[in-house]
Image: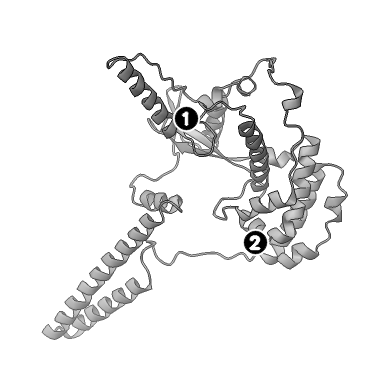
Amino acid sequence: MRRYFGEVDWSTLITASNVQKKWEAFINIYEEGVKRYVPKVETKRRYNNDWYNRRCEIAREERETAWNRWRRKNTQELWQNYTTTRNEYVRVIREERKNYEKDVMDKCKEEPKLFFRYVNSKMKNREGISRLKVNGQMCEDPAELAEIMNRSFQSVFTKEKTFVWQSEMSEEMGLGEIQVTEEDVKKQMERLDVRKIPGPDGVSGWILKECNQQLTWVIHNIIKSSLIESRVPIEWKRANIVPIYKGGSKEEPLNYRPVSLTSVVCKMCERLVKDKWMQYLEGNEVIIKQQFGFRRGRSCVTNLLSFYSRVVDIMQERDGWADCVYLDLKKAFDKVPHRKLL
């Protein structure tokens, strides 16, 4: 596939008049490469448990062999042999499961998905959204369930009114045009998490990462055109929406939050723009130090710790009392008007 991307004719992408046509040219070539060089194999899971391996299987076979021998001849010696192999099988099972669980815990920080996948496999109730309640009535039809979730997710977004922003910054302080180099794109491609699921366009992060030497300039060409035109391909605006259960009744649509699985290349472009913006905003101290959201090294936890620390300081200054208000806005990310926030 590397040879294919390195030798294929990219002239249709190079000569395309806008970013939409460039993207379509890339997708056509990409899909042809996948069709030619990515084999399709139907995988069949050999064991029901991740920790069950060949060693466990051998121990089980030895136990069954010993059992069948005892059933045929029914002697004390064969029974003793069976109990020995049975106990060995139990010991191997426990040992391999313990080793696997220890390995999952050791990798918990680097691979949290592995940990949660194992935990979820132990949960009794693992079904998806089987029914929802709307206006007091239960709905179980899959098509209707999807439409209900769609309407629920749309209902929490704020429709922004006309808002005129009063800027306090001079034009000289502005960021200007964002310059993205091939080296920037290459670094992003090398950092791609190959375990991530592709978006609606089907472009795999694994293929982009493995073929980054051949595709870096191609992706850079597309992203550069997008920034120059201030437009993105239509496919970048599409997403596969996955509802994630938050808490409360599983029959209430608003007790799920939407997670969007978008294009891998689109997310690369977003990270590149964000990095440039953050370099400018933090370098010029445009962002106040009290902001914790969407900043590297800061989170809700550090925000709460800072708040608690400030309250404790005030209480010490005032002999043990303090008045404070801490607000947590429900569905704030969905409801906050983005223009006013910016």
Quadrant holding the C terminus: top right
Closer to us: mark 2 or mark 1?
Answer: 2
Position above or below: 47 against 116:
below
**Disc 1, SS:** helix
Q: CA distance from mark 2 to mark 1?
A: 40 Å
Position above or below: 61 against 257:
below
**Disc 2, SS:** helix
Evaluate if marks 2 and 1 touch, with contact meaning CB atoms under 8 Å apart. Answer: no
Residue 156 in sight here: no
Specify whether 267 is left or right of 152. right
Count how many numbered circles sit on residues in the image. Answer: 2
Camera-side residue of 290 and 113? 290
Residue drawn where x is 60% and y is 52% of the image: 192
What label sits on residue 213 in the rendered view? none
Residue drawn where x is 65% and y is 52% of the image: 187
Residue 330: horizontal and vertical position, in percent?
46, 23
What label sits on residue 253 in the rendered view? 1
Q: Residues within 10 Å of mark 1 (few under 14, many from 20)?
A: many
Q: Quadrant of residue 93?
A: bottom left
Residue where numbered disc 2 is placed:
210
Camera-side residue of 311 and 186? 311
Q: Residues within 10 Å of mark 2 (few under 14, many from 20)?
A: some
Residue type of the residue flagged with mark 1: Pro
Residue 217 in sight here: yes
Position above or below: 309 against 213:
above
Quadrant holding the N terminus: bottom right
Residue 102: horizontal and vertical position, in percent?
33, 59
Which of the two discs, 2 and 1, labels the residue nearer the N terminus?
A: 2
Residue type of the residue flagged with mark 2: Glu
Residue drawn where x is 39% and y is 33% of the image: 247
Camera-side residue of 330 and 124? 330
Specify whether 23 is left or right of 141. right
